[in-house]
Image (cartoon, grey):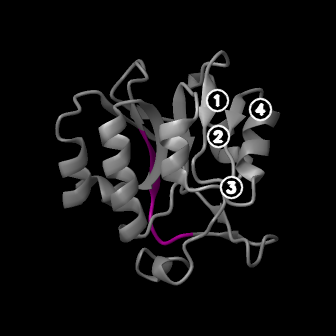
């Protein structure tokens, strides 16, 4: 079982298509979605198969955030503190729309609060069940983490600040 403590050892898990299907009705099909955490490219394929214009490539995610044309960041970032902290601070400085998957406890972290203190438009989508991810070392078996994740959204004008699926 994956815990937030052992993510330092293996921080690469992929997002099943089902996770995006659950919020598809909140995603505007006319937008360009960037996934800066490319991984094996399967997430981009999943998003495209759902009818979204998704882009990403296997280069440094921080270069992508600065250099590609896109409307919304849509990603499941690495959860380990060292990568996530840098990503959140970069995200904060961009002030662009996003949907990111995070362990819900990360919202209470000092680095999350510091990065997004000025944001008044953070919204949450709470899934109806615990999210499972794909372990690339064992793709046939879903990874059931010991922690609950949610979708953290910014500048999406959702109908409510907290949405329960």
Mark 4 and mark 1 residues within 8 Å of each other at the beta carbon: yes
Residue, x 33% and y 28% (percent of image)? 161
Q: Is residue 17 above or below residue 110?
A: above
- Which callout, 3 or 4, points to the residue nearer the camera? 3
**Of the numbered discs in the image, which one, if any, rests on residue 58?**
3
Distance, label 1 to label 2, CA atoms, is: 6 Å
Which quadrant of the view contains residue 102?
A: bottom left
> Residue 97: x percent and y percent?
43, 29
Name the residue nearer the viewer: 1 or 43. Answer: 43
Q: Which residue is mark 4?
A: 50
Residue at mark 4 to residue at mark 1: CA–CA distance: 8 Å
Contact between marks 2 and 4 (CB within 8 A): the answer is yes
Q: Position of residue 5 (x, y in %)?
A: 41, 80
Q: Is residue 59 visible?
A: yes
The residue singled out by tag 2 in the image is 20
Left or right: residue 153 versus residue 47 is left
Residue depicted at 37% across the width and 69% down the height: 82
CA–CA distance in space, label 2 to label 4: 8 Å
Query: Of callouts 3 and 4, which one flags the residue occurring earlier in the amino acid sequence?
Result: 4
Disc on the earlier residue, 3 or 2: 2
Report the mark closest to the observer, 3 or 1: 3
**For residue 137, what is the image quadrant?**
bottom right
Say few, some or many: other residues with alpha carbon within 10 Å of mark 2 (under 14 / 14 to 19 / 20 or more).
some
Q: For the residues labelled 1 and 2, say whether their Cβ atoms are less than 8 Å apart.
A: yes
Q: Which is nearer the N-term, disc 3 or disc 1?
A: 1
Magenta span of residues: 145-152
Number of numbered discs? 4
């Amino acid at each position: 079982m994956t815990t937030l403590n052992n993510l330092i050892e293996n921080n690469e898990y992929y997002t099943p298509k089902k996770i995006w299907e659950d919020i598809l009705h909140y995603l505007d099909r006319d937008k360009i979605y960037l996934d800066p955490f490319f991984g094996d490219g399967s997430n981009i394929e999943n998003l495209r198969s759902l009818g979204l214009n998704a882009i990403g490539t296997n280069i440094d995610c921080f270069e992508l955030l600065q250099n590609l044309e896109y409307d919304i960041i849509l990603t499941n970032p690495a959860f380990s503190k060292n990568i996530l902290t840098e990503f959140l601070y970069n995200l904060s400085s961009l002030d662009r729309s996003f949907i990111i998957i995070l362990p819900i406890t990360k919202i209470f972290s000092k680095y999350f609060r510091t990065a997004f203190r000025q944001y008044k438009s953070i919204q949450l989508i709470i899934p109806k069940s615990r999210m499972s991810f794909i372990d690339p070392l064992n793709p046939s078996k879903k990874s059931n983490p010991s922690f609950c994740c949610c979708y953290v959204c910014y500048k999406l004008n959702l109908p409510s600040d907290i949405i329960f699926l």
